[in-house]
Amino acid sequence: MSEDDKVNTGHNVESKDLIRNARKPVGELGHQILDRMNTSHETMAQWGVSHFEIESDSKILDIGCGGGRNIERFAEQISKNGRVVGIDYSEVSVEKSTELNRKFIDEGIVNVLQGSVSDMPFYDETFDIVTGFETIYFWPDFINDLKEVNRVLKKDGLVFFCNEAVYREGKMDKYEDLIELLDMKIYSEDVLKESLEKTGFKDFKSFINDENDWICVTARKI
Ligand SMILES: C[S@@+](CC[C@H](N)C(=O)[O-])C[C@H]1O[C@@H](n2cnc3c(N)ncnc32)[C@H](O)[C@@H]1O
C-alpha cells in the first residue's frame, strides 16, 4: 500500500479504502469494517452505556446501528415487553445487524430497518430511549435530524450519543486526514449542548473520558 492509500485516523494508520466505509458501509470492505467496529467500539460503548439505565420494558431505538452489537447488548437486557429497533441507511449494516440479532428478531423483540435518520418510519412518541454510537459525525443536517429524534421520543424520553472523538480547541490536528476523507463533523461538548437545547431537549449531561478522548451525552425530551 502506498502512502497515498493510507489515512491517519488519529489513532492508527489505516487503508483509506477500508476507513471510507465507516460513513456508509458497502460491499466486502463494508462487511469487514462492521465486524471490526463491533469489537473495536466495545470498551467505549460499555463506558457510554454506564451513564443511563434501561428498564425491562424499554422501547429503544439505535440509529446508525452498524454491525448491531449495541442492539444485541440492549436486547439482552429487556424482557418480551421491551423492544429494540435498529435503523441504518446502509444495506450492509442492516444485513450485519440482522445476522447478529437473528435470535432476538425471531423472538419478536428486535427489528432492524434500512432508513435515514432524517426521515424515520416511526410514529411520534414511540421510543423511551434513542441512542447513536459513532454516527452523528455523518448526519446530513444535525439540527433537523435532532428534531426528528425528538419527534420519535416519548415525553421525558432519553437521547444518548457516544463518540470516540470530541472537538477540542487546538487538539484537532490528529483528525485532519480523517475529517477530510470522511467529510465528518466532530462536535464539541458545547455544540452538542446548544444543539440539543434548541431542538426540544432538557437536562443535558456530558461525560468526557480524557484519556481516550471519548464523549457521551444524555438529554431528555421536554
Ligand atoms: C462508524 S459506524 C458506527 C456503527 C455502530 N453504531 C458502532 O458504534 O459500531 C456509523 C454508522 O452510521 C450509519 N449512518 C451514517 N449516517 C447515517 C444516516 N444519515 N442515517 C442512518 N444511518 C447512518 C452508517 O451507515 C454506519 O453504519
Image (tube, rainbow, N blue to C red):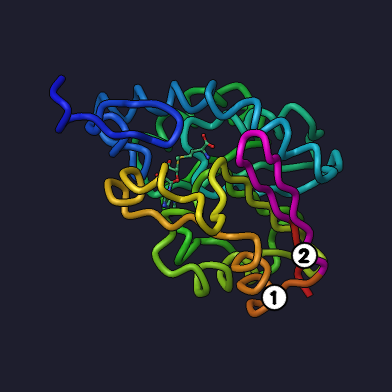
| Residue in the image at 43% along x and 36% along y | 10
Residue assigned mark 1: 197
- Left or right of 162 in this view: 7: left
Please, is residue 78 above or below residue 144 in the view?
Answer: above
- The residue sitting at the front extreme is 170
User: What residue would you read off at disc 2?
Assistant: 204
Pick the quarter of the image with the N terminus.
Answer: top left
Instruction: Establish if 143 lies above or below 95.
Output: below
Which SS does the magenta portion mostly show? strand
Image quarter in which the C terminus is found? bottom right
The reply to whether the C-beta atoms of the residues labelled 2 and 1 are less than 8 Å apart is: yes
Identify the residue at horizontal 82%, vertical 43% (top origin): 54
Foreground: 205 or 77?
A: 205
The residue carrying pointer 1 sits among few (fewer than 14), some (14 to 19) or many (20 or more) residues within 10 Å by Cα, namely some
Question: Given the image, on which type of amino acid does mark 1 rest?
Answer: Glu
Q: Nearer the viewer, residue 85 or 167?
A: 167
* Magenta highlight on residue 93: no
Give the extent of the magenta segment: 203-217
The amino acid on which the numbered mark 2 sits, given as a three-letter code, is Phe
Along the viewing direction, whichever of 145 and 169 lies nearer the viewer: 169
